[in-house]
Image (tube, coloured by chain):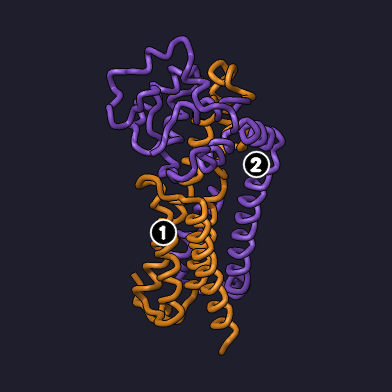
Chain colours: A purple, B orange
Amino acid sequence: MMPGAALPIVLLRPPAIKHPAEDMMRSYLPLAALAAATILAGVACSGDDAAEETPAAATATTVATSAATKPASTAAASPTGEAQATPAASPSATTAAGKVSANNATRAELQAAFETAGISGAAQWAREVVEYRPYPENDPNMAKLRQELAKYSPGPGVVDKIIAALSLP
Amino acid sequence: MSDDALLRRMLLGFAVLAALGTLAELGLERHYDGMDQRIPWVIAGAVAALGALLAIRPGPLAIRAARVLAVIALIGSAIGVFKHVEENHGAGALDYRYTETWESRSAADQWFKAATKQVGPAPVLAPGALALAALLLAAATVRHPAVRSLPEG
């Protein structure tokens, strides 16, 4: 994209003096713009496709989906479960089981819950959970969140741990 | 209709189509979390609107606005590419292949993996669609009759 940075300047200030090559430029400039645009679009599309076909991402999605039937309280019942009652947690966003609300908990509350569950990268996962809100209350398996988190190629069981630390609404 | 006018119409049509396609893609990706994710909506919407205006009622002001918008879109597109790389960089530690080793990798290696989308979900060059639409729009204003009538300076 950087090589084309000078193009707008040319477009903004067309030469005032006639030149023999002017007619040729007049003919080819729009075509050149079209070609550059087509290349840009093509490159952008190919990048996206490559990511979708990554076997690792597909594996992670499969693992996360197949493990979806595990009890939701698996991760929450860790020996360090007492630490879930962090000072930052608000009563409205934290349930009696120590879970935090997927839709209402703050990022800090989510991070604390994930750290308690032993999930590495808790801060980043908390950010992603907040980003993809809201989550439908009639989907206790949180398929939407699972689908979004699978894009990050998480390790086996990570998504299940995250879901286990969350509640709805 | 002259060849010039026909080509200009086609470029404007492609510009509007590209802008509308970008808007649709932004919607499908739910690209509206926070202010920075809403900026491409504004740029793409402006390209579509200006493209339509140039097709219906071309004038010196609209042509200048289109050129300025093209520059803004190119800058926005470059920023968008960087933001997508940055997003992928932030997601590096979440990838199960790099969870244990991400922090110990060199910065150059981390950014290379983010820029080549080996980590993270953000399509790195997707913001280039804005540049595409803007360049088409700007190309449609080259040697426009309304510009020729403008005084120099």
Q: Is residue A81 above or below residue B133?
A: above
Asked which quadrant contains residue B145, the reply is bottom left
- Work out whether residue A153 or residue B10 is closer to the camera in this orientation and state it: A153
Q: Is residue A81 above or below residue A145?
A: above
Residue at 41% from the left image edge and 59% from the top image edge = B43
Circle 2 residue: A51
In the picture, the quarter occupied by the C terminus of chain A is top left
Residue at the outermost top position: A79
Q: Are marks 2 and 1 on the same chain?
A: no
Chain for disc number 2: A
Asked which quadrant contains residue B49, the reply is bottom left
Circle 1 residue: B43
> Disc 2 and disc 1: Cα gap in Å?
26 Å
Q: Counting other residues with Cα less than 10 Å from the Cα at mark 1, is it few (<14), some (14-19), or many (20 or more)?
A: many
Residue A4 position within the rendered picture, expressed as x and y whole percent measured from the top left: 54, 54
Chain for disc number 1: B
Q: Is residue B152 above or below residue A114?
A: below
Residue B77 position within the rendered picture, expressed as x and y whole percent measured from the top left: 48, 51
Image side of residue A47 versus residue B38, left or right: right
Q: Is residue B103 above or below residue A10?
A: above
Residue B21 position within the rendered picture, expressed as x and y whole percent measured from the top left: 53, 63
Q: Which mark is residue A5?
A: none
Residue A94 position within the rendered picture, expressed as x and y whole percent measured from the top left: 34, 27
Secondary structure type for disc 2 = helix
- Work out whether residue A33 or residue B49 is closer to the camera in this orientation and state it: B49
Residue at 65% from the left image edge and 33% from the top image edge = A66
Q: Counting other residues with Cα less than 10 Å from the Cα at mark 2, is it few (<14), some (14-19), or many (20 or more)?
A: many
Image side of residue B142 versus residue B57, left or right: right
Residue at 50% from the left image edge and 52% from the top image edge = A5
Mark 2 residue type: Ala
- Work out whether residue A169 or residue A55 is closer to the camera in this orientation and state it: A169
Mark 2 vs mark 1, foreground winner is 2
